[in-house]
Amino acid sequence: MDQKNNEEQVVKEAKATTITYFKEKQNLDVVITGHEFGPKDLQSIYISGHVKDDKDKTFNITIKYSGEKYTIGSISKSKSLKLKY
């Protein structure tokens, strides 16, 4: 798989991981608004977005990836977004 297709696959899986996390763990529907790859040696991608129908409740989430495994790294959020821990 070439690098462009590989990056597209990482973005697709990272977005799906983010949406699933917020739906299953936080009972929230979210809208993804952007992404940015971290340093290559860290194998991470930063996903940004907001709660559906509430653009004031924003988040940035780090998704770590290794092969086919995608995990939540860290989450930063706006003050108005309350999460269950």
Image (spheres, rainbow, N blue to C red):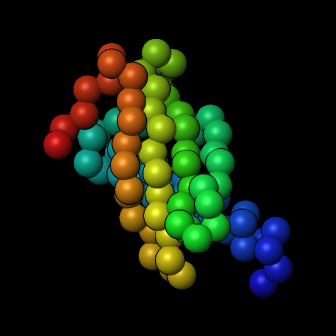
Assign the N terminus to one quadrant of the image.
bottom right
Q: Could you say where residue 47 lies in the image, as x and y percent from the top left?
A: 55, 45
User: In this image, 32 relative to 51: left or right?
Assistant: right
Q: Is 10 above or below relative to 31?
A: below
**Residue that appears at 33% across and 24% down:** 81
Q: In this orientation, does residue 71 appear? A: yes
Residue 73 figure quarter: bottom left
User: In this image, 14 relative to 10: left or right?
Assistant: left
Q: Is 49 above or below relative to 71?
A: above
Outermost residue, left side: 85
Q: Could you say where residue 57 lies in the image, as x and y percent from the top left?
A: 42, 21
Total numbered badges shown on the rendered structure = 0
**Residue that appears at 46% across and 26% down:** 58
Q: Could you say where residue 18 lies in the image, as x and y percent from the top left?
A: 45, 51
User: Which one is in front, 40 or 33?
Assistant: 40
**Residue that appears at 17% across and 43% down:** 85
Residue 43 figure quarter: bottom right
Q: In this orientation, does residue 51 appear? A: no
User: Which one is in front, 12 or 65?
Assistant: 65
